[in-house]
Amino acid sequence: MAALYEGYTLCGRVSGQSLSDSGIQGIEVERDNDHVIVTDSSRSVTLYMVSDQKPLSTWTVKQGQTFTCPAVYNSQTKEYVAVSDSKVIRIWKEEDMLLDKVFKSTVSSDIWRVHSIPGGEPVVLFKKGAMRLLDSLLTAPQQPIEEVISQDETIWWSTNLMAESQQFVIFTTEQKGNHFLYLQRLNPNTLQRYQLEREEPVLSPPSFCASYRDKHICLLYLYPNGHLYQSTLSVRNLGGVSEEAQALPLSRSLLLSLPVGEGPLKAASALILDEAHVAVVGVPHPSAGAGKDFLCIWNTNFQTLQAGKEMAGQIYGQLWRYSNKLFIPHGKMLSVIPYECPKSCLSSALGKLRQQCVIPSVPSWSNILHGENAQPPRTFNESILTNVKVCVNFLVQTAPLEEVQKEVEELLSHADSQDLQFSVGHLASALVSRSLANPSFYTSDILVQLVRTQFLCHSVCPDLLLLALERKDYFLCQLCLQFFPDIPEAMTCACLKAFISMPDADAEKVTLEPDSISFMEALIAREHGEASVQNGFSSSDDKDWICPVELHKAALLNEVLQTAYSDTFLLPHLKDLSSRQIILFLQYLHYLYLRYCQDASLSKPDVRSPSLTQIMDWICLLLDAHFTVLVMTPEARGLLMSLHIFVKSQVKLVSELGKIEASFQELDKMKVKRDVAQYSIEIIELL
């Protein structure tokens, strides 16, 4: 299932001309996917390194001058190209400091965009539809530029891509409510004009995107009524330049009918991620309340929401994608959101589309599953989604707790895994929304069952883990940590803070997974045994061998240790922990490490327990985040000294092992005698 991961801020948004302006004209990839060029809506172009979240260079034009299209990177010459005041082309290198001193050339007609892709020469698209390769234009900047589109026709959107080893430029126009698409091939030079079908009532698509696959160009366009259409264009057998009267009709197919909430979409955008997934921003989340803006990933094959992430602040209908990262301006910032669309969910989805289901007349789970009062059959994805939404709205939002629990149990006991994959996300989101709005309504058992289906993840229901923490449902927290692969680092730290702060009296009453408890019981049972020397180290402090936290609390902390994370994103959240919490957690990690060193068999593949590497990684993270505080805290000195002694002994052990490494290598090289009998004694001399 697709997932959206914890994002981070690339830069503060440059203030736009109005409240509806993000302040960003465009984002273009530079020499690799870790460098992007951000052009603001006025005077600046900035080069950012994405992984370090910092600007490397900024170039600005004079007061009164304005960049009128996004800057691009010419991979052939390793130069940047931008247009100011519609007609002035500027070209510079990264080491150039002042744009006034770089190459400038004024052309004879207004420019719409400059497009550049790796391996291709930059192309200049003029506002009247004509195109020129950059080099040929600069040889005669004042050359006359023809008008390809009519006087009352306006370009709305454009892009370029490589297909069949050829470069194509695509742009769309609007003329008196009609929308046209132009497909321009370079070398040889051909142009084809298509007319898009009208959307009634007359609407203009606010968002276009294009990609190339299976020898066809795929065009996606989103209308304000939530309809997302797809059209495909063959890149072969293109004719010459078409006349206006010869515009070909462009057929389309409806991919998704997205929710629009209380009115038409005002600032929305859709991007193709792969052959089965699209990212959408500015479209309401089906399970969220009004006034909330989301970034979502939808699967177009079986028309389900796969991941959703609420974006703080205003959305501007802008979205870019490079590598596995989405770039989205919202509020006063530009955020980078990593995402993943596993191929496994695509093959799974394609299989489900072949199934058939019936439409019930009564919104009941049993009717959906067994076909009572059935109407003529429709395809599986259409019928299941329709009825899931009906039942969620009718039952979860209005029915008493007992009735909801009964119906959900009916669903879980009779539905197969393919049915559940479509319905669990909608159901969980509705249950969580009602539980957050109504303190007296909470369905812990139902949520536990839904999590156990393993068809949920944090992106599908982002408020579930938050609700579990709020209700102090630590068993549900434990299951989420076990089954959700995409828990944000902020939520991981929230769980850690809640677990470590829990009073021991409360922890003793918590019901947890038996395996996690039995592992800790086995670990603590060895505390009274005699400590042995392992790995060259033996602790002289008996306190090091006593678990510093209560058994149930330790089991929960073990789940945190096994949760996936990124160091870069986790460290800032770790700094929110108090020194007391950090010291207690370090003491527990130290205890675990000593136990593992004493008995390596404690960590077994068939037992869910933290590994030695995970324990050491967390120790390093905590020390990185709080080293200054720990050094100045008297209560932490003993612990730091113990860790220092341990590391010192490990360094000594590794040094001693290094001395005999050469001898072991020689043993490896020695040839084994072939005439060795069943029993023999052989003496090997190491010189």
Image (cartoon, rainbow, N blue to C red):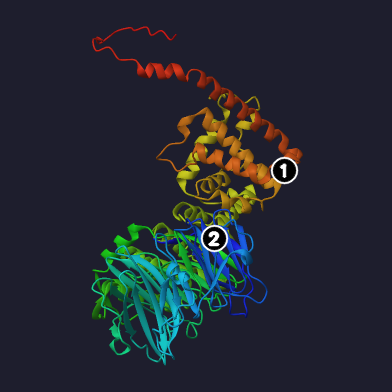
- The residue to which callout 1 is attached is 628
The type of residue carrying mark 2 is Gly
Spatial CA distance of label 2 from label 1 is 27 Å
The quadrant the N terminus occupies is bottom left
Q: Total marks drawn?
A: 2
Q: Secondary structure at mark 2?
A: loop
Q: At x 46% / y 75%, what residue is drawn?
A: 269
- Give the side of residue 540 with respect to residue 132, left or right: right
In the figure, is residue 117 to the left or right of 314? left
Quadrant placement of the C terminus: top left
Q: Residues within 10 Å of mark 1 (few under 14, many from 20)?
A: few
User: Who is closer to the viewer here, 638 or 94?
Assistant: 94
> For the residue marked with disc 1, what is the amino acid?
Thr
Q: Is residue 124 above or below residue 518?
A: below
Residue 132 against residue 175 in the figure, above or below: above
x 50%, y 29%: residue:
599
Left/right placement of residue 49 relative to residue 426 reads: right
Residue 587 image-quadrant placement:
top right
Q: Residue 192 in the image: x percent, y percent?
A: 31, 79
> Marks 1 and 2: in contact by CB < 8 Å?
no
Residue 191 vertical position relative to residue 624 in the rendered view, above or below: below
Which disc, if any, is residue 7?
Answer: 2
